[in-house]
Amino acid sequence: MFKIMLIEDDESLFNEMKDRLSQWSYDIYGVQDFGKVMEAYSSIQPELVIIDIKLPQYDGFHWCRLIRAHSNVPIIFLSSRDHPTDMVMSMHLGADDFVQKPFHFEVLIAKIQATLRRVYNYNTERVELRTWRGATIEYVKNTLTHDQQAVLLTKNEMLILKLLVEHKNQIVTREELIRSLWDHEHFVSDNTLTVNVNRLRKKLEPLGLDSYIETHVGQGYQATEEANI
C-alpha cells in the first residue's frame, strides 16, 4: 500500500479525495497544521505527495522547495488557478505532474498510477549503473558522478537522461520523452518538457556535460558520445 500525503486545506475536497483514493488501496495522510508541513512529511515518509498551490501561511511552491531540498519523492500539484505559469513553476521546482481543478477523479487516479509506476518500477530495474562521457550514472540513487563530483537528479531528470543515454547519438523525439515521463501526453504542454530538459542541463553544467545534451529543433534531443566508445 502506497502512502500518499495530501496537502489540501479544503476539508470537503480532502475528505472526498481521501475516500476516493482509499478505494484504490492508497493510504492517505493529511496535514493538521499548515505551518508545520515538513514536520508532518518527516513523520509520514510518504511515497507520493499531492500539494495544492493555494494554501494558508505558505503556498505549495514553498513546501515543494523544502521537500525537494531533502527528497526526490514524486510530487503532483493541484491548482484552481488558470495560469500556465503555475504549471511551468511547478515543473521548474521538480514536480512530477500537475492537475488543474476542477478535475475528474479518473484523470487524477491515472496520473497517480502513472507516476508511481514510473518512479518505483523504474527504480527496481536490474540495470543500476551506466557510464556516459566518463560519468557514472546510478539509477537507483538518482546520481551522476564525474571526476569525484556528484549531482543528485530528480526522478524526471534521471528518466530523461536515461532515455537519452540509452539511445546515445540518436535523436529521441519530444513525443517519446513526454510519453515516457507522463504517460498521458495530451494533458502535458510541450513547454513542460523544455523546462525539465533545461533543469537537467543546469545540473550537468558543473560536471561539464551540459553541452552533450543537444537540441534538434522540431525533432527532439540527443545525448552525444564519442564514436570510439
Image: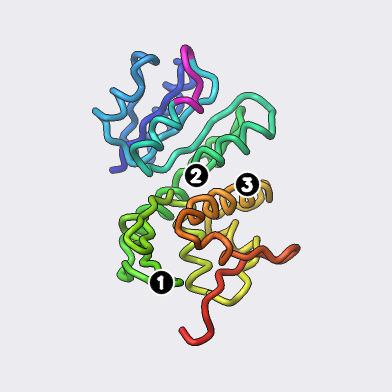
Label ID, residue 192 = 3
- In the figure, residue 149 lies in which quadrant? bottom left
Residue furthest right as drawn: 218
For residue 22, side relative to residue 188 (left or right): left
| Residue type marked 2 | Asp
Quarter of the rendering occupied by the N terminus: top left
**What kind of element bears circle 1?**
loop
Q: Position of residue 170 (x, y in %)?
A: 60, 76
**Residue 173 image position (x, y, % from top left):** 65, 66
Q: In this view, does 215 lie to the left or right of 57?
A: right
Residue position for label 1: 134
Residue type at the position of mark 3: Thr
Evaluate if marks 1 and 3 touch, with contact meaning CB atoms under 8 Å apart.
Answer: no
Magenta residues (range): 56-62
Identified at 42% across, 51% down, the residue is 153
- Residue type at mark 1: give it: Gly
Q: What element carries label 2?
A: loop
Of the two numbered discs 1 and 2 on the same chain, state the one appearing first in sequence. Answer: 2
Residue 118 x, y percent position in the rendering: 43, 55
Q: Name the residue at 51% across, 59% down.
A: 160
Which mark, by number, is residue 96?
2
Q: Residue at x 63, y 65 (%)?
A: 214
State the CA–CA distance, disc 3 to disc 2.
10 Å
> On screen, 205 above or below 221?
above
Mark 3 falls on what kind of element?
helix
The Cα–Cα distance between marks 1 and 2, rounded to whole angstroms, is 28 Å
